[in-house]
Amino acid sequence: MKTLSVDHLLGIKYLTAEDIHLIFETATQFKEVINRPIKKVPSLRDITIANLFFENSTRTKLSFELAQKRLSADVINFSAGQSSVQKGETLVDTVNNILAMKVDMIVMRHPYPGAAHFLSQQVNACIINAGDGTHEHPTQALLDAFSLKEKLGELEGKRIAIIGDILHSRVALSNIYALKMLGAEVRLCAPKSLLPKHIESLGVMVSTDLMSTLNWCDAANMLRVQNERMELNYFPSIREYSQYYGLTLERLKQLRKEILILHPGPINRGVEITSAVADSPHSIILDQVENGVAIRMAVIYLLASKLIIPTT
Ligand code: CP
């Protein structure tokens, strides 16, 4: 059996192109399974997984839980807001107590960049990063690239734009790593204040011009303006942001070609994307959500296969 080169999924940065292809091959098989009348396989009957969410989530949390249940794993869920973290318990103590209940794998979302990496060095369990602050969101990038590949074929040479609040986005960084690894050309588009300094060093192009970026790309991944991570004003007003960087149907109609539209969610309708675009045939937003379950099944299955000691 082919295996991943890593024992944890901490970020796309730590994967190889072969790892991504293996995750996609496995996800393709699981996508077929979850579209059957019986959507479950018994693969992980002996595995227990804890989902630790220290930050809000809809898609990632539900998608991981569903993926685990489709694989027949035992699942426990932890939300920091209702836990003893509120009484001052540390992250490592919290996780070691959960692991003492014979849990094999931890899926964690945390507001601090590097939290998943830190945890992987402190505890004896497989860790999956479900988003760490503004750093990485590896399963989101995997499901984005998988959804693009389904629609565009192999991503080698394809032109993918990432548009919006790049500065605060873990989705942007993980997408850049994944898309570059798969041979795509990547262009970032945002107001200068929302572009990290020296981001070109990752081998991406940078633009502040929305229409030229849309005319250049085969697909545009529209990112949310992350007001909750902004301590400063990065642009004069939301109205002005959407005037220059909001994706409208009128703008799409001015293009010389059809392009695909992605969005990781949650959407700020009328800010970075209008409802008319989000709900249009250009949009593959709900395909991304569907593929998220298959991708997470693949990641969990492949990492769990490294935990199970074969009986000879
Ligand atoms: N895409 C994403 O991470 O969405 P949630 O914050 O709802 O999980």
Image (cartoon, rainbow, N blue to C red):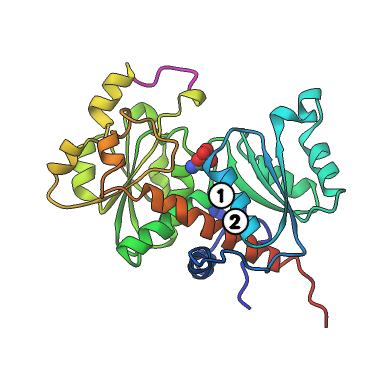
Q: Position of residue 125 (x, y in %)?
A: 77, 54
Q: Are marks 2 and 1 in contact (CB under 8 Å)?
A: yes
Look at 34% across and 31% down and name the residue there.
269
**Majority secondary structure of the magenta segment?**
loop
Compared to residue 178, the image places residue 224 above or below, namely above
Secondary structure of the residue carrying tag 1 is helix
Residue extending furthest front? 37
Q: Is residue 124 left or right of residue 233?
A: right
Q: Amino acid at mark 1?
A: Ser
**Numbered mark located on residue 67 in the image:** 2
Residue 201 in sight:
yes
Q: Position of residue 280 (x, y in %)?
A: 26, 45
Look at 84% across and 53% down and name the residue there.
102
The quarter of the image holding the N terminus is: bottom right
Q: Position of residue 109 (x, y in %)?
A: 63, 40
Residue 10 in sight:
no
- Observer-nearest of 183 and 124: 124
Look at 63% across and 34% down and name the residue there.
112
Compared to residue 23, the image places residue 278 above or below, namely above
Q: Is mark 1 within 8 Å of ligand 1?
A: yes
Does 232 appear in magenta?
yes
Compared to residue 35, the image places residue 227 above or below, namely above
**Numbered mark located on residue 63 in the image:** 1
Quadrant of residue 148 within the rendered picture: bottom left
The residue range painted magenta reads: 230-235
